[in-house]
Structure formats: C-alpha cells, structure tokens
Amino acid sequence: DSGVTQTPKHLITATGQRVTLRCSPRSGDLSVYWYQQSLDQGLQFLIQYYNGEERAKGNILERFSAQQFPDLHSELNLSSLELGDSALYFCASSVGSGSFSYNEQFFGPGTRLTVL
Amino acid sequence: GNSVTQMEGPVTLSEEAFLTINCTYTATGYPSLFWYVQYPGEGLQLLLKATKADDKGSNKGFEATYRKETTSFHLEKGSVQVSDSAVYFCALSSDTGNQFYFGTGTSLTVIP
C-alpha cells in the first residue's frame, strides 16, 4: 500500500459526459501527479500540482483539467468524454516540488474509466 | 524530443532463469532513468533509478546501468522468481526535470 488513495476504483459513463476523479496523496506529500494509461497511448504524464499550484504539464487535453485543494487532495476533471478516453488514470504523490529526478513518486491503485 | 523504447513482451521465463529487459532512450541533455514495476491490480512502484551516466541502480536483485554511449538502461536479474511476475516500465525524466516519459511496458511471467 503506497498510501495514495484514489476514488472511485471504477467508473462507467457515456460519451459526452463529464466525470471527476479524486486523489488523496500520502500524508506529508505536497505534489500530486496525474497519469493516463491506455492501450494505444501507453502511460502518459498529464499534469503535476504542488501545494495548490500547477507545476508541470504533459500531454493533457484541453477537455481535461485538474486542481489541488488546500487539504492537498486533487481532482482530475474530464469533460466531453470520448471513447478514446477510456483508460486507467493514476495519481502519484511526492514530497517535493521539483525535479522528477529527485522526488520519488508513490502511485495510487488507479481509477478505471470506461466510456461507452 | 524525449522518448523511451523498451522490448516488446510478453516475456515468459522459468524460475531461476536470467532476465534482461532492454530499454533505450532518446533525450536531450542528461536525463535521469528509472525502472518501475506494476504488479497485477496495483499501481506502479519505483524499482530502481540512475541519475547520471555510468550509475548503476539496484534493488531486490534487479540492476540497470545508465549507458550514455549506447543510450540504454537495460534491466537485469540473475535469477527470477515467480513473485517477479509483473509489468516492467522503463522511464526517463527530462534534463529540466519537469517532464516524465514511460516506455510501453514489458510483461514478465515466471513459471515454476
């Protein structure tokens, strides 16, 4: 158990809908990262937040947005969903704000999103 | 741009066999390199890392050496166990430290 929790575990929805995925980091971690793991794209970094502020951005679509709240939990919002958005969405957390090289990330178990 | 290429799977080995999973990368500057492992139904876990050329990362009997001359970071283990069955991901962080790239993953099954 990494200490990172994600809810829900599974989510099934329809095209065009909007969903929110939630992540609670390990106690004491200030950074939260979001990743998408899909069959065709593999595992992709989406975005990082540190202490409420966006820190780094990867291949995140404009239809997707994230935020980190004062209690440090984070939410990933996915809107106008398409079939291709079906994937496993992972959240990770780390203590520091800076380089991926020096801040070990701890991954949650993921949320499986199915868009029908 | 930055990218990671790792060998296609799946890989099936007998217990106590030698394991190599190849990983090569393309990057500007001096990236850091990582191997992550994903056990069934779980999130990824950091297995080992190396932050500069010629560094060797090691953990739980696994090793990988950062080879800048061949842009490689191959994962090796001398004697695999059934409990090593998992998906292994090679990854790099950009030299600016603010981007992270994963390979496609290699599924390993170890049979008794």
Image (tube, coloured by chain):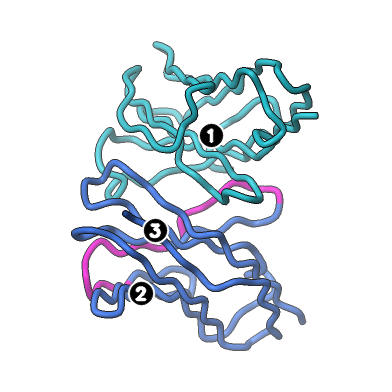
Q: Which of marks 1 and 2 is in front?
A: 2
Q: Is residue B32 magenta?
A: no
Tell me the residue at 69%/25% (across/down): A8
Chain B, chosen colour in render? blue
Disc number placed over residue B72 in the picture, else none: 2
Q: Distance between the residues labelled 3 and 1?
A: 27 Å
Q: What element carries label 2?
A: loop
In the image, the chain rendered in cyan is A
Q: Say which quarter of the image contains residue B12.
A: bottom right
Using the image, determine if residue A36 lies above or below residue B51: above
Disc number placed over residue A4 in the picture, else none: 1
Q: What stretch is highlighted in magenta?
A: B41-56
Q: Which of marks 3 and 1 is in front?
A: 3
Q: Give residue B33's position: percent from left, percent from top.
A: 34, 61
Evaluate if marks 3 and 1 touch, with contact meaning CB atoms under 8 Å apart: no
Give me the chain letter of mark 2. Answer: B
Residue that mark 3 sits on:
B3
Q: How far apart are marks 1 and 2 (CA)?
A: 31 Å
Q: What amino acid does circle 1 point to?
A: Val
